[in-house]
Amino acid sequence: MDKTSREQALQILEVLRKGQPEQFTAFGPYYQAIVDGKLPEYYLTELKRRRYQYSDNLPELDVPIDHPEYSYLKLEAAHNHSSYPLMKCRRNVIVGTSLTLTDLVGQEIVFDSTIQ
């Protein structure tokens, strides 16, 4: 991924604000961090969230998160419950962390390209 400039981030934020409120909620903080020059802090917060809010435990069932046992309705209901499957072993967490590390290099926050 190429480095996103402050100007590009401002343009993207404007588009998201005007026509895509759900996307603004999801991606707005990332682009706002670029605009504010606080992308390293944004990523540090994201990585800490994954480290501390996601469990090291393995699931009782060896199924993907989109399995009916872990339907989004069940996740909503269990959000504050200990069975909520926020687990580091889940595919979405592993892929998300990998993409975060790749973006850290692409945004020139980390200069060691061997982590890609």
Image: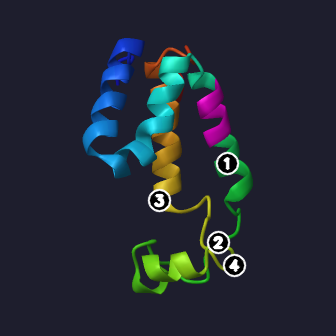
Could you say where residue 61 lies in the image, as x and y percent from the top left?
55, 83
- Assess disc 3: are there few (<14), some (14-19) or many (≥20) residues with their C-alpha within 10 Å of its C-alpha: few
Which residue was labeled with disc 4? 81
Under tag 3, what secondary structure?
Answer: helix
Which residue was labeled with disc 2? 58
Q: Which mark is residue 91?
A: 3
Q: Amino acid at mark 2?
A: Leu
Q: At 70% across and 63% down in the image, what residue appears?
A: 55
Q: Amino acid at mark 4?
A: His
Could you say where residue 8 lies in the image, as x and y percent from the top left?
33, 18
Front: mark 4 or 3: 4
Residues shaded magenta: 41-46
Q: Quadrant location of residue 1?
A: top left
CA gap, disc 2 and disc 4: 16 Å
CA gap, disc 1 and disc 2: 18 Å
CA gap, disc 1 and disc 3: 16 Å
Front: mark 1 or 3: 1
Under tag 4, what secondary structure?
Answer: loop
Under tag 2, what secondary structure?
Answer: loop
User: Is residue 45 placed above or below 32 in the rendered structure?
Assistant: below
Which residue was labeled with disc 1? 49
Could you say where residue 4 lies in the image, as x and y percent from the top left?
38, 18
Q: Is residue 116 visible?
A: no
Q: Earlier in the sequence, mark 1 or mark 2?
A: 1
User: Is residue 5 placed above or below 89 in the rendered structure?
Assistant: above
CA gap, disc 3 and disc 2: 12 Å
Q: Amino acid at mark 3?
A: Arg
Q: Main secondary structure of the magenta part?
A: helix
